Amino acid sequence: MRRHALAATLALACVAALAAVPLPVSAHVNDVRGDPQVSADGTVLVETAYVADDAWLAVYRDDDGSRGEVIATRRLSGAGFRTDLAVSIDEAAWRDWPEGEARTVHVALHNDEGSSGFDPEEDEVLTFFGRAATDRFTLERGTGAYVGARAFSPQETDGPSVTARTVRLPSDGHLVARNVTDVGENETALEPVGATALGAGTHGNVTVELDEDYYERQDARARIAFTVYRDDGDGTFDADDEPVRAGGETLTTFVSLNRTDTGGGDGAGDGDEGAAVTTPSATDGSDDGSLVTTATAGSTASGDGTSGDGTATDASTTGTDGQPGFGTLAAALALVVGLVAHARRRRT
């Protein structure tokens, strides 16, 4: 009885520790995030997916706000954090998708029971602390457009700049960094604080220089939004440039950053978060350029920066994204798993 009481007490303490970890939206365990985008060939880019074991990624039609018919699947082999994960919509479903039409799609992570293929009845949706590992976003058929920047941990910066991982523009335009307010579930992208011109097509690791005055006003932690804009023909980002949209939704993603040049603040770069080691997702048998990231112990967190020029605005963009301290979370989870296993051994 004493051992059971001790296990229960430790488990409760572990849960309390988890509650103390800053989790803006959800922890990156069995978690998936997608953003509005435009696809030319039926390929959907899922911005981030974290699984603790083998899993399935499924894309669904929207059915009056709920998940409807499955229109794409991809198996994920092994645990890890994946970015810009490509999933191809079934040919028949894409063939019936009119050019220029925008629809809501749902994406979900499912467990993998080891059968010959994906079975939504057998392979249930994964959850983490009661939250289903699902998301939904707008997908339009047209010339490709996308921006991806969410990461395993915040970007680190020692100066006024911030980097987006993947940017796709349908025509010549700009990648714009924007100030973020109401950080959390209802965070909103407001005025631009930096921009860089880009040609049509896909670009990787695009850095935006931030307005120095804006940057210096930021604390050790900051939050930035990335939005892609079409250029109006003058080659300069200004109020005449329009944001790229999928349906009526602006293509925007959100990213956190740590300033390492503040000499204090809230502990940015103090080594209390697991590092991100990123490798090509060869375990998936794919060559689409998606990445798998796993945590390593005893290393510093990474982060990103922000700032701008205060020109064009689009205050309608909102989004959600959580970037918790994974090292603390993983340790607490490991303790819970260990306690449960110990209790089971005692009962048997």
Image (cartoon, rainbow, N blue to C red):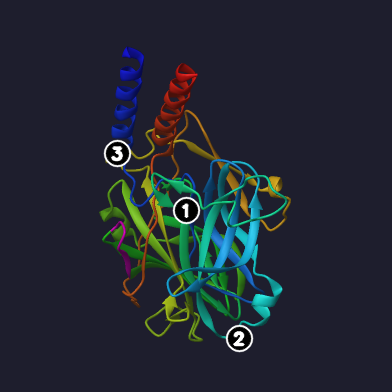
Seen in the picture, residue 341 relative to 97 is either above or below; the reply is above
Seen in the picture, residue 324 relative to 336 is either above or below; the reply is below
Instruction: Count how many numbered circles sit on residues in the image.
Output: 3
Q: Which residue is mark 1?
A: 133
Is residue 186 within the magenta segment?
Answer: yes
Q: Disc 1 vs disc 3: Cβ atoms closer than 8 Å? A: no
- Distance, label 1 to label 2, CA atoms, is 29 Å
Is residue 207 within the magenta segment?
Answer: no
Question: Quick one: label 1, few (<14), some, or many (20+) residues within 10 Å?
Answer: many
Report the mark closest to the observer, 1 or 3: 1
Using the rendered image of the protein, determine whether residue 159 is visible from the camera's viewpoint. Answer: no
Q: Which callout, 1 or 3, points at the residue further toward the start of the chain?
A: 3
Amino acid type shown at disc 1: Ala
Seen in the picture, residue 312 relative to 267 is either above or below; the reply is below
Question: Quick one: label 2, few (<14), some, or many (20+) residues within 10 Å?
Answer: few
Q: Which callout, 1 or 2, points at the residue further toward the start of the chain?
A: 2
Question: Quick one: label 3, few (<14), some, or many (20+) residues within 10 Å?
Answer: few
Q: Say the numbered circle drawn on residue 293.
A: none
Q: Nearer the viewer, residue 308 or 148?
A: 148
Amino acid type shown at disc 3: Ala
Identify the magenta region. Answer: 183-190
Q: Which residue is mark 2?
A: 98
| Position in image of residue 102 (x %, y %) | 51, 80
| Position in image of residue 75 (x %, y %) | 65, 52
What residue is shown at x 68% (from left), y 70% (from top)? 90
Amino acid type shown at disc 2: Pro
Q: Secondary structure at mark 3?
A: helix
| Position in image of residue 155 (x %, y %) | 44, 48
What residue is shown at x 49% (from left), y 55% (from top)? 32
Q: Which residue is mark 3?
A: 19
What residue is shown at x 44% (from left), y 56% (from top)? 162
